[in-house]
Image (spheres, grey):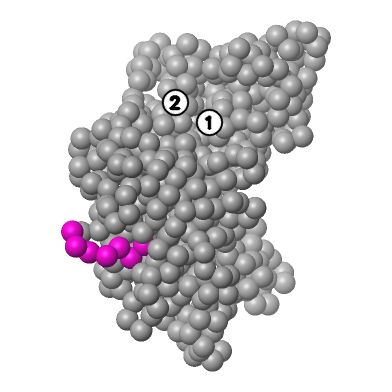
Amino acid sequence: MTAPTLGTHVSSLPPEGARPPWGGPAAGGTPLLDVRGLRVAFGAKEVVHGIDFSIAEGEKLALVGESGSGKTVTALSLLRLVQNADISGAASFAGGEGRDAARDLLSLPEARLRGIRGKEIAMIFQEPMTALNALYTVGDQIAEVLELHEGLPARAAQEAAVQLLADTGIPEPARRARAFPHQLSGGQRQRAMIAMALACKPRLLLADEPTTALDVTVRAQILELLAELQRKHHMAVLLITHDLNLVRRFADRVAVMEDGHIVEQGAVATVFGAPQHAYTRKLIDSRPARDVPPVPAEAKAAPPVLEAEALRVSYPVSRPGVAGWFRKGEFVAVQGADFRIAQGETLGVVGESGSGKSTLALAALGLLKYGGSLGVAGQRWSAGGASDRALRRQMQVVFQDPFSSLSPRMTVEQIVGEGLTVHAPELDTAARRGRALAALADVGLSEAQFPSLLERYPHEFSGGQRQRLAIARALIVDPKLLVLDEPTSALDVTIQKQVLGLLQRLQRERGLSYLLITHDVEVIRAMAHQVIVMKDGAILESGGVDRVLDAPEHPYTQKLVAAALAD
């Protein structure tokens, strides 16, 4: 049996002792991890089809592909952390000084594998908020690893946990160690996860989308931190990601997965410079593309679809000490925001988490009390009066995560047609169904593709298809403006490009206006006409997208743009 060639599906083993020409450690080296013929199946359905790859000591290998390609299942299977899975093949993990000879991770007894997990092979999970235990402090969770694997007494383990947090750059590490996960920011939680993973100085780190949920500047910081710690500890890293920019900056080699097969692998510069497989080329060509017409002069001269002057949103907070008994304090989430959106125009709002972007969007939707002036199509929000219902028809919203924003108990017909029951109650069932099918066709979903489309439920669709359902739900009442709250951040790069293309087409055809909330500078560059940059509730810079992104004046904007370019 011959070794697979570049660009072919890897579904069989090369001859014993042979190394594929496109993978493996340096010549003459012994790999730290050598995976051969890995197969993973759930019942009769096989999801990973006999893949081969290896990682040398101190090497960084990126496993790249879209959601559902088998990346995460592959990584979890190495430590046998996938429930109800049938795993076969071999995963030889080399022994080190004072350790046993190479061990097959897939056949080790559970007791021995438990000694390797967290100690010799550690893992950083994609979403730290769900991976960390909400009932224990961050310090206690890091200390537990040291007590279990290193045998440290409780006090020494706590001190070591504080030092590990300090090593990851968390400010006030002693105080943060006493904090619960929900009391930390996203970047701080991810740093805590890294501290926990590196507590026992593992030889191999499995990093599953370690920066996906983070802002662009925090993402750059985490990536630099991982690279620094990898060099310091001479650790091997298996990076699971769909972010090709991350791979370019971080990895030595890359393996591309599609539908449970490794279709291509090799040095990052080689694969990205001259990709051989069509799927690799598709991934590389998936950067957001700008296809946005200029706003007509008559639209700019006409009354705006949305206009705000000195918009201010604040929340009451408890004050420390005795003063808090008598009067609440105030946290200002948005202060003095001025902006306008013309028909057919996109205003991009960019900033890190906590900058006030989403609060501004909720105020624009009339869902929060606000100060200042806010007008929608020349009208003001009232305090829940009848006039608000007409305004809500003019202004709809598409949320960040379509899986959580679509009710799992409602059919597609109920979800998409829900707005008509409120805003067009005179329509009968047949008319509502016809409007729902038309809205779905507008976003690229039809019964020809999906038989019994209207009777299906959200879980029967992919992430990109669910976001199309969310857009159809918003469009069915013919709004003038859509609030897009991170509409592509939960999607793969190829699906992101498709959804952005759909939004651009709908804007051209319908003259829609968009209020686009995002932390992704590339999405802003592809979609926006105007952009405002927010930090700590204030607008630091605003103007045309080319001026703000190509010649930023404020240091914070310069930092955001520089981080996006580096990413």
Report the amino acid beneath label 1. Answer: Gly
Tell me where the magenta segment starts and ends, as one range: 27-33
Q: Which numbered disc, 2 or 1, marks the residue that appears first in the sequence?
A: 1
Magenta residues, dominant SS class: loop
Report the amino acid beneath label 2. Answer: Gln
| Rendered image quadrant of residue 360 | top right
Point out residue 51 in the picture as x, y percentages from the top left corner.
Answer: 41, 46
Labelled disc at residue 510: none
Point out residue 341 in the picture as x, y percentages from the top left corner.
Answer: 46, 26
Point out residue 55 in the picture as x, y percentages from the top left corner.
Answer: 32, 59
Query: Who's the residue at 51% across and 35% down the image?
Result: 487
Query: Who's the residue at 32% across and 28% down the image?
Result: 278
Q: Can the viewer see residue 99?
A: yes
Labelled disc at residue 498: 2
Against 403, is 214 above or below? Answer: below
**Closer to us: 58 or 419:** 58
Whether residues under marks 2 and 1 lie with C-beta atoms below 8 angstroms apart, the answer is yes
Image quadrant occupied by the N terminus: top left
Crowd band around label 2 with a 10 angstrom C-alpha radius: few (<14), some (14–19), many (20+):
some
Q: Which residue is mark 1?
A: 464
